[in-house]
Image (spheres, rainbow, N blue to C red):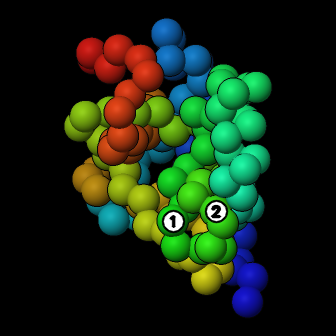
Amino acid sequence: MLAKVLPPQKVYVSSAGKKGLGVFAASPIGAGETIEVAHVREVPQSLERAIEELAPELFHYLFWWEGGAADAQSAVAFGFAPFYNHSRTPNLKLSHNFEDRTITFQTVRDVQPNEELTFDYDTKLWFDDSE
């Protein structure tokens, strides 16, 4: 069953300095609020390897997805999902729904207007994450 698409209502995409683009709070957001339910498309392992080799700048936008199709370990997420940046002190958590093929982004604490929304990438980083 296709999950209902929930477009982001309280956030906007803007420059995040050296990180490129980022997602920011447009208004106060309370802890535990769902910011976005992003639909995904699974990426077969063979295509994932080709993306890593031929387009490494796109490879870093893939999300971990080891609960869906047997031949998929990652997925492309749509919506604002590609623009949430990494932080060691994130204000978002992710929940994967493999049946509906969605990723839910939810706040873990109150977020102030114009504060960047981030999550911990929980992987070996390919960039300096000093904040």
Q: How crowded is the residue under tag 2: few (<14 C-alpha within 10 Å), some, or many (20+)? A: some
Query: Distance of mark 2 from mark 1, alpha carbons?
Result: 7 Å
Q: Which residue lies furthest to the bottom in this view?
A: 1
* Residue under the image location 36 percent in, 56 percent down: 93
Nearer the N terminus, badge 2 or badge 1?
Answer: 1
Which element carries disc 1, helix, strand or loop?
Answer: loop
Where is residue 55? Give x, y as percent: 74, 26
Where is residue 33? Give x, y as percent: 41, 64
* Residue under the image location 54 percent in, 29 percent down: 22
* Residue under the image location 26 percent in, 53 percent down: 109
Hey, which quadrant is residue 119 in on the image?
top left
- Can residue 85 be seen here? The reply is yes
Which element carries disc 2, helix, strand or loop?
Answer: strand
Where is residue 104? Give x, y as percent: 51, 64
Where is residue 114? Give x, y as percent: 45, 30
Q: Mark 1 points at which residue?
A: 66
Hey, which quadrant is residue 52 in on the image?
top right
Label 1 near label 2: C-beta < 8 Å?
A: yes
Q: Which amino acid does label 1 sit on?
A: Glu
Quadrant, the N terminus: bottom right
Q: Is residue 54 above or below residue 117?
A: above
Q: Residue 45 carries which label?
A: none
Q: What residue type is labelled 2?
A: Ala
Q: Mark 2 points at which residue?
A: 72
Residue nearer the viewer, 83 or 29: 83
Q: How crowded is the residue under tag 1: few (<14 C-alpha within 10 Å), some, or many (20+)? A: some
Q: Is residue 70 above or below residue 62?
A: below
- Can residue 12 be seen here? The reply is no
Quadrant, the C terminus: top left
